[in-house]
Image (tube, rainbow, N blue to C red):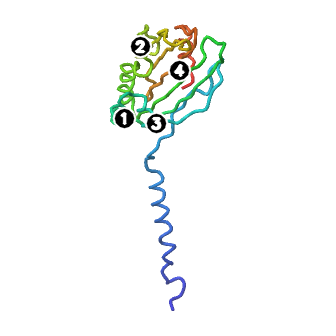
Amino acid sequence: MDPPENRPPPIGLLLAPLLALVFAVVSCGPSKEAAPPDTPADLPGFRPGPVSVLSLDDVASDALDPAQLGGLLRANGFTGAAVRAFSAGMDAPVRTVRVEVVAFDRPAGAQPYLDWLHEHAKEFLGAVRDEPGLDPPGAFVLSHAPAGCCSKEQPVWLAAWRHGDNVVWIQVMGPDVGRAHVEKLVDDVQASV
């Protein structure tokens, strides 16, 4: 029998460093699921609801043609989305604010979704009117006035813009929503995402 100093090390001692290296390479590789983008934690005067993480299919379901929007999202590097609603109560001029952030793997990927959102907003708001733009550059603002067919229908405003790799859009609802409310909310959301 060979003395201990001449024996080859046990196979386990040889494999352990190799397995550790393989594990490190695999675990540090690109993740299939990116962390959801941040939504505002707070908006002054509103109670925040929970954050909901949205899949590509969840975002695509906003469209009349989900397959078409899903293809656009996939082709432009969609990495995740999150939404949070804020409530101010029944007596407030603005009752509800919904903030959605849709993330892409590059700024150029966000622009096609922003363009789609502007072009297709009537699919989920009904008849819309373009309002004068606001900061940041490239943002758009749309308003929807009640048609009078439903006594509980309220005015809805939508503002959307690109923030780096993300598209941020807010939907503002309430009986007395006006441009000044929307501008203030856009400033608040911009400061927090």
Residue at 63% from the left image edge and 26% from the top image edge: 48
Disc 4: which residue: 190
Tell me which amino acid carries mark 4. Answer: Gln
The answer to the question of whether label 4 and label 1 lie on touching residues, with beta carbons closer than 8 A, is: no
Q: Earlier in the sequence, mark 4 or mark 1?
A: 1
Q: Disc 1 to disc 3, how far (Cα)?
A: 12 Å
Disc 2: which residue: 127
The mark closer to the camera, 2 or 3, is 2
> Compared to 41, does 172 lie above or below?
above
Badge 3 element: strand
Q: Disc 2 to disc 3, how far (Cα)?
A: 29 Å
Q: Disc 4 to disc 1, how far (Cα)?
A: 26 Å
Tell me which amino acid carries mark 2. Answer: Ala
Quadrant position of residue 187: top right
Residue at 55% from the left image edge and 7% from the top image edge: 180
Disc 3: which residue: 80
Q: Is residue 63 left or right of residue 184?
A: left
